[in-house]
Structure formats: C-alpha cells, structure tokens
Image: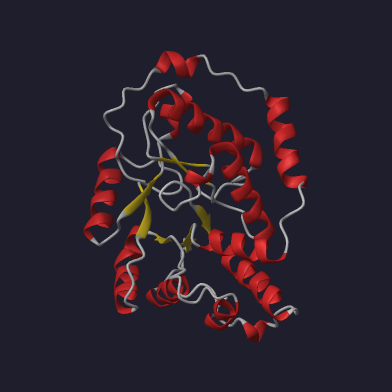
Amino acid sequence: MSAHNQGTELDLSWISKIQVNQPAVLRRAEQIQARRTVKKEWQAAWLLKAVTLIDLTTLSGDDTASNVQRLCYKAKYPIREDLLKALNMHDKGITTAAVCVYPARVCDAVRALQAAGCNIPVASVATGFPAGQTHLKTRLEEIRLAVEDGASEIDVVINRNLVLTGQWEGADFIKTSTGKETVNATFPVAIVMLRAIRDFFWKTGNKIGFKPAGGIRSAKDSLAWLSLVKEELGDEWLTPELFRIGASSLLSDIERQIYHHVTGRYAAYHDLPMS
C-alpha cells in the first residue's frame, strides 16, 4: 500500500528455491474451513475485531458522490450504536480500517469523512485497476492524482507480466487478488502468501501486510480469515497496519450477527437500514 521497505535488497536466489507442498496446503485449508467457530461473547468480540480490519469498498462503474458518502458514513458507524452499547463497546471508537474507492471518487470520500469528523484513511485502487495493463506513465499519474486528492493508501495493481517472468519487486502489503477475478481470495493461496510473509520476516525482520479481497461476504468467513492469520503469523499481525479485509457486503452480515447476539433474534430488513 505504501513504500516503507525500499532499503531491503531482494534475494532472488532464495525466492527461486521456494517449493510449495500443495497437498499439505490443501489439507491446512480444509482444516481452517471445517473448524467450528467461536461462540457467544467470544464470537461478538472477534466480529468487532474483524470490523476494524475491513477496507470498506465500492468499486462499481456507477459509483456516485452520494453512494460514496453513504459508504463513508457506514465506515464511521459500522455497527448500530444501541448494539454497541449493549456490548459496552460504544465508546471504543470502532470504525472500519479504511474506505476504498476508485481514484475519481477519492475527493468525494475525503469530503464525506471530513464532514463526518473522522480520520479514517481513504484507500484507492490505482494503476489501471483491475487489469494493470495501462502504460507506466499513466499508472504513475493515476497514483499521483489520487494522493493529491487525499488518498493516503494506494492499492497498486502490479504488472503481472513481471511476476510471470520472474521480475520480482518488493511491497509493503500483498493482496490475494483485485476482487474482480472469477476466483479471488482462497485459503490455499492465502496460506502460501502468509508463509511467504513469515519466511520473509524471519529472514529480514521486515513485516509485510496481507489483504484478502473478493468473495468474503459472511461473518463466518471473516472469523476463518482472522484465525488463519493469527495461527500463521501471530497476534501482532491482527492490526490494520498489517492485515486488511477488502469487502463490500461483509459488514452487513457481521452487523446482522451482532444484532442476533444482542437481541436473540434475526434482523428484519428495516432493523438495519444502513446495511
């Protein structure tokens, strides 16, 4: 998302020796998905933690200032206040980690968040999202304009040709996918990425962030992702600085589950109108 680790020289000989034990990775992925989730108060706490790690996202061709404004309001008030009060969490400043929009909508997001009096960062996809096939000059200009408009984080779409031909570059965050592919965030791919982050940390002392994106829609899914990151990398990675979940509809399901935990019944559509 940003460039903090430019001083670390990339050891390509180490990278070329990496081998993936695919059957073991698939077994680990099945284990994560088959596990029973935490219950009751523990589940509510984990779900609130998940909220604080969400990059609340809208990346539609028909995005407007008004729907970005609604998204920003939801980012600041992700869970209904009476539900947070019932959990004694109303004064903990729970917000999503960021709002993520196209570069042309960054101004709208920045204005809406300023009007709401909050300092949630605005992230922007750039560099020819989602294909990343535009000219380098255009890609760099898109980043410059997004930052100029107030984006403090940039999700860069790498030129995949460089990866496929082994021309590796460093990053502060690695992301499973753009979220616009046929298949996006999957557990087997995530396991390989997380272990690469772990190996890199052991080798260099540098912590690289991780962001799964695309297809993460249920509260149960979010708990599985948190468990995976906790077990593979440890509690220190369960912060917005090192872990984000890119999602648009996930927050609605988390709020529904919180509602059920507090009231004992499932929410009707009108109970959570901002979802």
Q: Is residue 95 left or right of residue 184?
A: left
Q: In the rendered view, would you say 101 is above or below 65?
A: above
Q: Is residue 169 left or right of residue 58?
A: left
Q: Position of residue 33 (x, y in %)?
A: 73, 46
The picture quadrant where one finds residue 84 is: bottom right
**Residue occupying image coordinates x 30% and y 40%:** 3
**Residue occupying image coordinates x 54% and y 50%:** 213
The quadrant in which the C terminus is found is bottom right
User: Going by the picture, which residue comes out furthest to the bottom?
Assistant: 270
Q: Position of residue 253 (x, y in %)?
A: 64, 68
Of residues 193 and 234, the one nearer the viewer is 234
Residue 218 appears in the figure: no
Q: Is residue 261 left or right of residue 235?
A: right
Color theme of the render: secondary structure
Of residues 37 and 213, the one nearer the viewer is 37
**Residue occupying image coordinates x 45% and y 33%:** 160
Q: Position of residue 111 (x, y in %)?
A: 29, 73
Q: Is residue 201 left or right of residue 247?
A: left
Q: Position of residue 121 (x, y in %)?
A: 35, 61
Q: In the rendered view, would you say 81 is above or below 56?
A: below
**Residue occupying image coordinates x 47% and y 75%:** 77
Q: In the rendered view, would you say 184 is above or below 200?
A: below
- Picture mark count: 0
Of residues 89 and 157, the one nearer the viewer is 89
The picture quadrant where one finds residue 222 is: bottom right
Residue 90 appears in the figure: yes
